[in-house]
Amino acid sequence: MDAEITAEELKSVLEADDDVQIVDIRPPAAFERGHIPGSDNIPFEELPQRVEELDSETRIVTVCPLGKSSIQAARLIASYEGVSDTTVESLAGGLDGWEYALTESIDDEANAPF
């Protein structure tokens, strides 16, 4: 793991349209309720089996509710040889410190009138 990144720094990276992959490690139901725009959901328990999906990334930021589990996830990703040239960071303070808009997944069936 390279470091932690603040919410403000991550927002700047996203606004600059820099190449960054945000990996939200929460369970799918929590991810669907709201997540940082453009992030992908790879639950923590699936990360060891899915880490190779991140091979082509140049910068990865892991995200969790409070910024504790995402540090562990960032360390796990950084230990994978397929990302040896990748910058791997954890969002400091997690989603709890993210003061900006979140994207919600819309489940059309859940909103259906019948």
Image: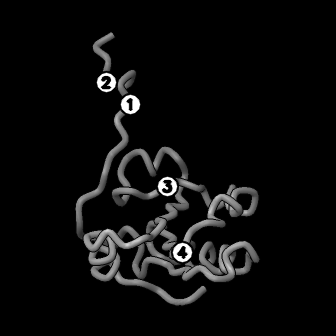
Decide: marks 2, 4 in contact (CB < 8 A)? no
Label 1 and label 4: CA atoms lie apart by: 32 Å
Where is residue 69 shown, x and y percent of the image? 57, 73
* Residue occupied by mark 3: 40
* Residue occupied by mark 2: 111
Secondary structure beneath label 1? loop
| Between discs 3 and 1, the one toward the N terminus | 3
Eye-nearest disc, 1 or 4: 4
Label 3 and label 1: CA atoms lie apart by: 17 Å
> At label 2, which amino acid type do we have?
Asn
CA neighbours of label 2 inside 10 A, class few (<14), some (14 to 19), many (20+) = few
CA neighbours of label 3 inside 10 A, class few (<14), some (14 to 19), many (20+) = some
* Residue occupied by mark 4: 58
> At label 1, which amino acid type do we have?
Asp
Label 2 and label 3: CA atoms lie apart by: 23 Å
Decide: marks 2, 3 in contact (CB < 8 A)? no
* Left or right: residue 49 compared with residue 64: right
| Between discs 2 and 4, the one toward the N terminus | 4
Secondary structure beneath label 3? strand
Where is residue 58 shown, x and y percent of the image? 54, 75
* Left or right: residue 26 compared with residue 37: right
* Residue occupied by mark 1: 107
Front residue (pair 73, 88): 88
Give the residue furthest to the top: 114
The N terminus appears in which quarter of the rendering?
bottom right
